[in-house]
Image: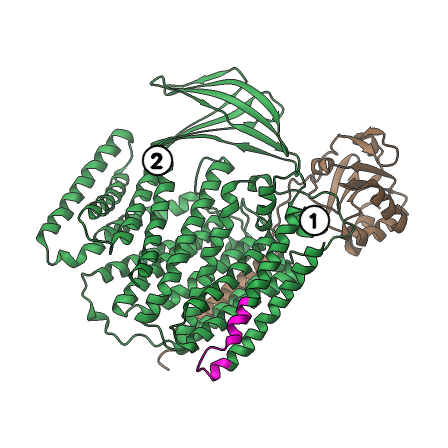
Chain colours: A green, B brown
Amino acid sequence: MIYNVIGNYSLILGLFFGLALFYFSLKNFRNSKALDAKILSFTFLQFFLVVISFLCLVLSFVVSDFSNETVFNNSHTTKPIFYKIAGTWGNHEGSLLLWLLVLTLFILIFLVKTKNQPIKYRILTLVFQQIIIVGFFVFLIKTSNPFNYIYPIPTEGLGLNPILQDPALVIHPPILYLGYVGSSIIFSSALAATSLNLVSKNWASHIKKWVLSSWVFLTLGILLGSIWAYYELGWGGFWFWDPVENVSLMPWLALTTLLHCILVLEKKSILTSWVIILSISTFALSMSGTFLVRSGILNSVHTFANDPERGLFILIFLFSLIFLSLFIFFSFHKPSKNNPSSFSLLSKETAIIINNWFMMYFLSVVLIGTIYPIFLDVLSSEKISVGPPFYHKLIIPFLIPFLIIMAIGPKLKWIKSNLEDKIYLITLLVVSILLSILIVKNFSSNLLINTILISSAFYLFFITLRDFFINKGFKNLAQNTAHFGFSLLILSILFNNLFSTETITNLKVGETFENTKTKIIFESISQKEEKNYKSIMAKFTIQNSKGKIENLSPELRIYNQPNIVTSEADIRTTLLSDKFIVINVVPNQELFNVRYQVKPFMLWIWISVILISVGGLMSFLKKEYEK
Amino acid sequence: MKNKLLPTTITLIFIIIFIVFYKGLKDTNIYTPETKINNKVPSLLVNLFDTGKTVNTFEIFKSDKFYLLNIWSSWCVPCREEHSILMELKNNDSLKVIGMNYKDNKDNAKNFLKELGNPYDKIIFDKKGTHAIEWGAYGVPESFLINNNKIIKKYIGPLNKVSFEEIKLLIK
């Protein structure tokens, strides 16, 4: 009870510190010899208050204080302590509080870490960041206060949605938020730098770190979400082009493009407009993600709190930020005076620009696929849903040139000079094509496009692989690791799609299903009572054509609070393929619906995304190391 | 200025996007667990609040009268708001109000009724909140208008003047 009061007042006080910071920043901006000590201490205090407020919410969850509406709606006394704590950010109110926590933390780090930057730039970044922070404070306090009070106090809570009770999902939101919110710093700093005309090499090398760190977090965040979808939802896939997944992919695409532009800006002082626009759009996309998900405007498997009032607030807030940034961009930005022809047509930079355009294309496909249904619904009341075929048809063909440019782009410098490398490049291309023809011919009857696609992915794979061996020092290792990871990702996804097999059948206990490749024996079934659910365990024996035997036991869980049945797939992961089995109840019959899948290279999808992030991390650490 | 066309166009595009999103928000289609409209009343064995007797819901809604099943709880704030409307509906002869007390403490619920009056002909005691789910409800308060053992209308959230008039019209 006391936590409710403390948490609530800390939030209100934090909002006042935000308003005070505007005043002191503007005062300091006019007379900018040194940074006012008050600014730093106020920023710290604001952060501190949000920490207190967050801890209050965590404690309310831990002690199951049901006088708090958020706790009542999302927790239950029988829940394990781990998920009680995780329940703090597993809901709308708590997750917004987490946003705020990260926002205030990041601006504090920014101020502490930028002692060498111009004072005016630091203050202006703080002002833009405070606009966002104050906006979130008002949003939280007004529409989604996590400390609402209920009286009389209920004795029991309603429970956390069981599909959210999963370790991957416990760390997924915080990591994803670190990525999203990191992009807010990039946004504020880009606006500040544009207003002061500071977009330069210097600025690029300082903001690069923020870009890299948010990029790594966003990549890992998406990975965790994907792992959760694969292991918990039990649909047998890792990416469904669901709107909620798309809204996390869009900022990632923008951020990835931004990362490459920043690298060029840092070396050559070009692409300033790209950098500014991408900095703005990355954050705008992160925010619109929040809008689309939280307002209930989209129908999706992950429906969160549906509340039009909340949606309206975010919508107005988001568009105010967009119009503010458009205004700043058009009135202050002066396109770089550098002559664009100062780099040659056949250079790394050209390759990066071409691939930027491809990335923008992928981004627009995802964007259109996600928001087109909303437009259609509003304009003609027609309801459609955009599924995987749309994305596959529009994205896959363009991956081919994208991959090839990604492979030879970093090499373009020496194409002009070095003959030996030219031979290498061509030999590897031939090897890739031959290998792909071999694979596609042997395993699938399908099409020219698979061969070309796999060839280009192999091509990138071999070229980056070779670069690990021809020693070029630490310099390109980060880039190479990330690009190698990306080629591995594309290869794994392709093989996974092409060579997956699926068997669906209805079985009773004791029955056997058999086809040419596999034999599925439904051995037995057993029941068990757990703390907050009842579990039905099935035992299956799977025998493949070579006689290899595998035991799998998928599970059905019947949770008591709230009353929901979930099916836990049993997944046997090996280095080369995953065996995946899931059961479902067929209503009013003794039959169980059994779905058995063999999915090659699943593990490598996760590994390759981790490699990509490791590449980003290495690049992040490299700068520290050199300094 | 060099060119004002670009900023104007982009601003216009964003304004259009804003308007579309704004309109989209106005008619948000909220998911309902399962719409049980025009469905038969589920046949469940339930306990009655006062006597603790076990009865079948089928028995409760047996006659050809109109029934309003109201799911409520003493801890639910909006239930307090709609209570006066239920008290008014009680006076209507062609309608019987049936309560379903949802995840509640019996003493709290009794005090609630003592304070605000008891509009209910019978009260089903749903301590665990499972019956409400069988009815396709997803929160409190919620009300179902029933006739001839069929659910003809479902009200999500507290009843208000508009739904009050509508109910009166429907049961005429």
Residue A274 appears anywhere in the view: no
Q: Secondary structure at mark 1?
A: loop
Q: Are marks 2 and 1 on the same chain?
A: yes
**Mark 2 falls within which chain?**
A
Q: Which residue is mark 2?
A: A601
The majority secondary structure of the magenta stretch comes to: helix
Q: Residues within 10 Å of mark 2 (few under 14, many from 20)?
A: many
Q: Secondary structure at mark 2?
A: loop
Q: Which residue is mark 1?
A: A65
- Measuring from the top left, give residue B53's x and y in whole percent: 85, 29
Q: Can you say whether B45 is above or below A477 in the image? A: above
Please tell me which residue lies in front, A521 or A132.
A132
- Measuring from the top left, give residue A587's x and y in whole percent: 61, 26
Check residue A41 for magenta coloring: yes
Task: State which region is magenta.
Answer: A28-44
**Mark 1 falls within which chain?**
A
Residue A17 disc label: none
Q: CA distance from mark 2 to mark 1?
A: 46 Å
Report the amino acid beneath label 2: Phe
Residue at 30% in and 70% down: A201
Report the amino acid beneath label 1: Asp
